[in-house]
Amino acid sequence: MSPHAAAAQPAQPQTDQADTSPNVPQPKKPDRLFGVLPNYGTVEDATTVSAITPKETFRMAASNSFDPYVFPFVGVIAALSQVENQEKSLGRRPGAYAVRYATSLADSSISSFLTSAIVPTLLKQDPRYFELRQGGVWHRARYAASRTLITRSRSGETQFNLSGIGGNAIAATVSNLYYPSADHSTTQTLTRWGTQVMWDAVSNELKEFWPDIRRRMHHD
């Protein structure tokens, strides 16, 4: 589930066909947080970034939704839900975990496509996270948290992050189509919305400080 503090100048749209000439540097493969979690929507150097296209946002959403490491991660989330007996109507029967896994995977995938591709395309917003990488720890932590509410347009202007906040609200509402009818209350729908927004905020913090952690891990 953002503008750089000092917004970069609007960049020229990126073409779909990459130059494979040996003299032209090729794009770096997407990084992974701690070598595991997909990190396809992070920009480390906002001074050289190109404007994102709708096709790229959908590709990014698909990668974040169906990356192989997403499936075991969703399994952990479903297991925590089983232990805490969330969605009490399911109980802790043997088949409840399978239902919780399916609904958690649907939550994650639908939220990813809405916040990273569909709503940003409609609103012409850029769903990527632009790292700050300047200032003290608390300054950067506040910046990362603020990106939950603030994003940038595709032309580089600072805007309210309606793609993230609104996209997650739509996803939480859609979830009532596949959650048990006993879990369709307004409170539970708002809880699912808040949980997705919380995960986006946590993800932003990890994305902001991952380059520092990575350097320490590799003794750069």
Image (spheres, rainbow, N blue to C red):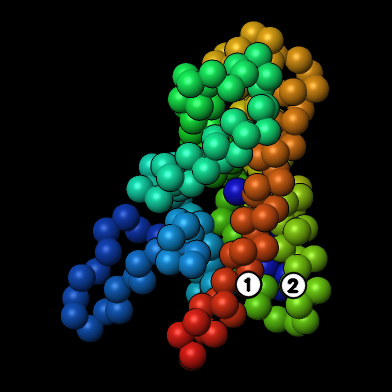
- Tell me if I can see residue 214 in this picture: yes
Residue 143 locus on image (x, y percent): 76, 66
Residue 186 locus on image (x, y percent): 78, 18
In the image, 113: left or right of 135? left
State whether residue 42 is above or below residue 75: below
In the image, 107: left or right of 141? left
In space, the residues marked 2 and 1 are separated at their CA atoms by 8 Å
Camera-nearest residue between 8 and 81? 81
Residue 63 locus on image (x, y percent): 40, 48
Camera-nearest residue between 2 and 80? 80
Labels 2 and 1 touching (C-beta < 8 A) = yes
Judging by the rendered image, the residue that carries numbered circle 2 is 140
Judging by the rendered image, the residue that carries numbered circle 1 is 209
Label 2 sits on a secondary structure element that is helix
Camera-nearest residue between 191 and 116? 191
Q: Residue at x 60, y 39 (%)?
A: 80
